[in-house]
Amino acid sequence: MLKAVANAFKLPDLRRKILFTLLILVVFRFASHVPVPGVNAEALRELFTRNQLFSLLDMFSGGAMSNFSVMAMGVYPLITAQIVLQLLTPVIPALDALSKEGAAGREKINLYTHLLTIPLAFLQALGQASVLANTATAAGPALPNFGFSAGTWFSSLTTLVTLTAGTMFAVWLGELIDQDGIGNGLSIIIFGGIVAGMPGRVAQLWISNKWSVLVFVILTAITVVGIVIVQEGQRRIPVQYAKRVRGNKIYGGQSTHIPLQVNSAGMIPLIFAVSIIMMPSVIASYFTASKVVWVAKAADFISRLFSSENAFYWILYFILVVGFTYFYTDVIFNQQNLPETLQRQGGFIPGIRPGGRTAEYLSGVLRRITLVGALFLGVVAILPWLVRPLVGTNSMLITSTGLLIVVGVVLDTMKQLEAQLMMRHYEGFIKKVR
């Protein structure tokens, strides 16, 4: 890997792409430290120490939300829009037809995704700002001037527009990386934010327990190796294409394979699961101070039940991750429509009849290998709970979702880098022959 990076820096165009990507990351990190006006910094710090949902959103914003900067939402609204459209594509016939139109259809779906991102970003900004304004802390609300009364509506609207504009700016930076840099732009931006927060986590662990740093470094290294093995693991289904005779020429007849990934869902199940499992405690937090006794007691019980200190929280988290892995894998597999594509192109799996039988066979194989990926994701998700008896804390150097993102981004970027190097190698060879 280091050799590939060193070789890339020897080529002027690849060196420019890498330096451009690093420049965009620097711009994003600078923007992440520009706070929204009127933020109570002390109340914000106190809120983040006790709210798990904000910690998750802070990861996707690249650490910008803990400062409640103009980039507080990062690219999360775009990711939400992409997931929503992915789930709606097989349900809405118009979107399903667009997905089958090739490059032109993908461009339209990409446009719809960006258009959907704007209202989603505005709604998310409204939700986050309202929570910060209405959640009481010892230092007061984090956004004391947010509201829609006669004296605060203009400043509140300015805050919402600023946060929405910050999201679209982050999306634009990611697309600049896609065009002129190296790697996936949105993933690179999230990756930069996660990595930027690591030194602070190491310092906190070092202060609390010096031995825990060594334990977490070893556990992180082992987990990274496991993620690489599972992410790269695949079952190759052999495919044979029938021979076709046209005039005096014979077409087809070649053999290939379908690579079914052990983990086709990536990090999406973790995002779904953690969002759902945190929802009850977040909602209950609004009613703990209720004057109605039974409501306050019920809210307190739910808050304790869905707390990360409770074993029920981690067991349910594991079950949800496994369930969502199967659900999202099925959604992606159905969208690809591999059996119909194979039949249309004259391909077949040896010993399996084309059509419905092929669909049943591929679904069965995918479900069996997904069991390994689902169980692995579940173990990675509850890893902080499993190691807590050793180190006495649920904190990790990188969260489960963050670790999957970091490893996935590094693998994807290195693959792109190696592909670029190989392409230039062959170009040089061809020019030399000429």
Image: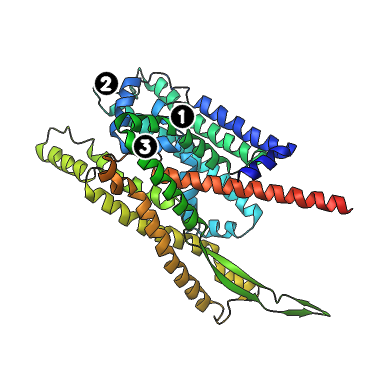
Q: Could you say which disc has been placed on residue 163 in the image?
A: 1
Which structural element holds mark 1?
helix
Q: Nearer the viewer, residue 348 or 210?
A: 210
Mark 2 Cα-neighbour bin, 10 Å: few <14, some 14–19, many ≥20: some
Which structural element holds mark 2?
loop
Give the quadrant of residue 38.
Answer: top left
For the residues labelled 3 and 1, the Cα–Cα distance comes to 35 Å
Nearest-to-viewer mark from 1 and 2:
2
Which of the marked residues, 1 or 2, is nearer the chain's N terminus?
A: 2
**Residue drawn at (46%, 29%), measured in percent from left and top?**
163
Which of the marked residues, 2 or 3, is nearer the chain's N terminus?
A: 2
Q: Could you say which disc has been placed on residue 37 in the image?
A: none
Q: Is residue 190 above or below residue 385?
A: above
Nearest-to-viewer mark from 3 and 1:
3
For the residues labelled 1 and 2, the Cα–Cα distance comes to 22 Å
**Residue drawn at (65%, 38%), measured in percent from left and top?**
181
Q: Nearer the viewer, residue 357 or 367?
A: 367
Determine which residue is flagged by label 3: 213
Q: Is residue 364 left or right of residue 306?
A: right
**Residue drawn at (18%, 40%), measured in percent from left and top?**
299
Nearest-to-viewer mark from 2 and 3:
3
Q: Is residue 3 left or right of residue 96?
A: right
Q: Is residue 243 left or right of residue 115?
A: right
The disc labelled 3 sits on which kind of residue? Answer: Val
